[in-house]
């Protein structure tokens, strides 16, 4: 009897005049996620009074639907439901069917009437259904802290009865907030930063800087795997692979050792911004966390972002490493990020990197480099991987 699923949103409901726009994108994303999980099954998605109803032609595994909807940002919760006619005896029968098979001993009944024309009010429904459950099952009513709750939602043309309520990921529907470019390194931070950008409704394109052939190809393979994991939330994306070794060589040959990482990052930002503008992306997302490493002090971040005019989003700015790793475990990127790899910025890493960069010094050093030529040559060698 797992054919109908009720989906609620929360933040989308606060959008007032723009709510229809967000609802439309949320519905599209739900359809895509379900089509990916059930390519052979027929189903419909229908908006009903600030809710969505998913109806399958045949019974489907609840766990499979759960896995599909847990990746759809914008959903607050969802439930497998029994849909019955708007008749109290039918509602009572459905509630008993669900509650008899449950081991919990205390319960509550919570009815909501979207259809105010129903002859009984919410409290009267609660009392009647609750009394029948006590009579038939021996369970006890507990309105303060029940082990299980029987929910009843009266719609325009049906009553929905359910006991399970699964938590959705929240946030805003992906693509509702525009498109961004994520600097994806292969470590923990950038993947978690991408997750938070997706949760706020951004559609993510990825860029990865590598130092092949001086480093092995494993970092590139890792990043492809991470992009695939993150695409669980957005369905498809592009990953731009940027060969960065020659630019690093020029920096090493023509600048003081302590400024290398800052100069690496300035060139990365230049290339990222140029790519973002070319692709119509509105911001750059990084995995920076304030003070975590030498390049992430306030002074160094200011020196690095000075080369861009595009917004730089740092979703992890206030998180420490343990918090970031905990989130990586939760979203499924931990195992891949934990695999060792050669990072582009760690190549030719100085023993004592500058932590309080002064912009005039950086600009003076950078004059020794043919910036435009290096950026142009690097971009010409960039490769695209469609994920």
Image: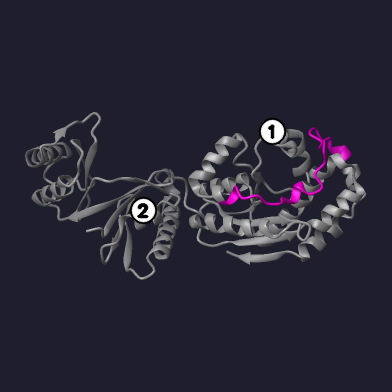
Q: Is residue 87 above or below residue 36?
A: above
The image shows residue 252 at horizontal and vertical percentages of 87, 49
Boundaries of the magenta span = 336-362
Residue 182 percent coordinates (x, y): 63, 52
First along the sequence among labels 1 and 2 = 2
Answer whether residue 141 is magenta in the image: no
In the rendered view, does 335 fall on the left or right side of 3? right
Q: Position of residue 128 (x, y in %)?
A: 10, 40
Q: Nearer the viewer, residue 70 or 217?
A: 217
- Residue positioned 62% across, 56% down in the render: 222
Q: Which residue is mark 1?
A: 291
Give the x, y percent position of residue 355.
Answer: 78, 34
Q: CA distance from mark 1 to mark 2?
A: 38 Å
Disc ID at residue 66: 2
The residue furthest bottom is: 40
Q: Main secondary structure of the magenta part?
A: loop
- Label 2 CA crowd tier, 10 Å (few <14, some 14–19, many 20+): some
Magenta stretch: includes residue 346: yes
For label 2, the SS is: helix
375 sits to left or right of 197: right
**Residue at point 63% right, 47% down?**
187
User: Which quarter of the picture shows residue 3?
Assistant: bottom left
């Amino acid at each position: 009897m797992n054919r109908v699923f009720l989906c609620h949103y929360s933040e989308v409901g606060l959008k007032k005049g723009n709510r229809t726009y967000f609802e439309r994108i949320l519905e599209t994303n739900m359809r895509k996620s379900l089509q990916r999980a059930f390519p052979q099954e027929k189903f419909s998605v229908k908006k009903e009074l600030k809710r969505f109803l998913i109806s399958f032609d045949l019974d489907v595994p609840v766990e499979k639907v759960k896995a599909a909807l847990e990746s759809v940002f914008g959903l607050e919760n969802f439930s497998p439901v029994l849909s019955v006619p708007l008749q109290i005896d039918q509602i009572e029968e459905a509630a008993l069917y669900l509650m008899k098979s449950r081991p919990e001993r205390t319960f509550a009944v919570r009815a909501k009437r979207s259809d105010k024309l129903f002859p009984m009010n919410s409290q009267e429904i609660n009392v009647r259904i609750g009394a029948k459950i006590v009579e038939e099952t021996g369970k006890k009513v507990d309105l303060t802290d029940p082990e299980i709750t029987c929910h009843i939602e009266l719609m325009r043309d049906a009553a929905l009865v359910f006991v399970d309520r699964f938590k959705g990921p929240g946030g805003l529907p992906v693509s509702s907030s525009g498109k961004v470019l994520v600097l994806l390194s292969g470590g923990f931070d950038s993947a978690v930063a991408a997750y938070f950008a997706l949760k706020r409704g951004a559609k993510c394109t990825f860029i990865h800087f590598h130092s092949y052939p001086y480093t092995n190809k494993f970092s590139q393979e890792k990043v492809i795997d991470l992009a695939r994991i993150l695409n669980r939330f957005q369905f498809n994306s592009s990953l731009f692979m940027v060969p960065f070794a020659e630019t690093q060589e020029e920096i090493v040959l023509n600048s003081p050792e302590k400024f290398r990482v800052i100069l690496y990052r300035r060139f990365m930002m230049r290339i990222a911004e140029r790519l973002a503008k070319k692709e119509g992306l509105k911001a750059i997302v990084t995995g920076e966390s304030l003070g975590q490493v030498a390049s992430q002090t306030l002074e160094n971040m200011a020196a690095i972002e000075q080369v861009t005019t595009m917004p730089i989003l740092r979703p992890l700015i206030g998180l420490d490493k343990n918090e970031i790793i905990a989130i990586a475990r939760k979203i499924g990127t931990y195992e891949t990020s934990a695999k060792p790899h050669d990072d582009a910025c760690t190549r030719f890493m100085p023993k004592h990197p500058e932590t309080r960069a002064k912009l005039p010094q950086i600009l003076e050093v950078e004059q020794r480099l043919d910036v435009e030529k290096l950026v142009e040559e690097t971009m010409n060698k960039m490769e695209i991987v469609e994920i």
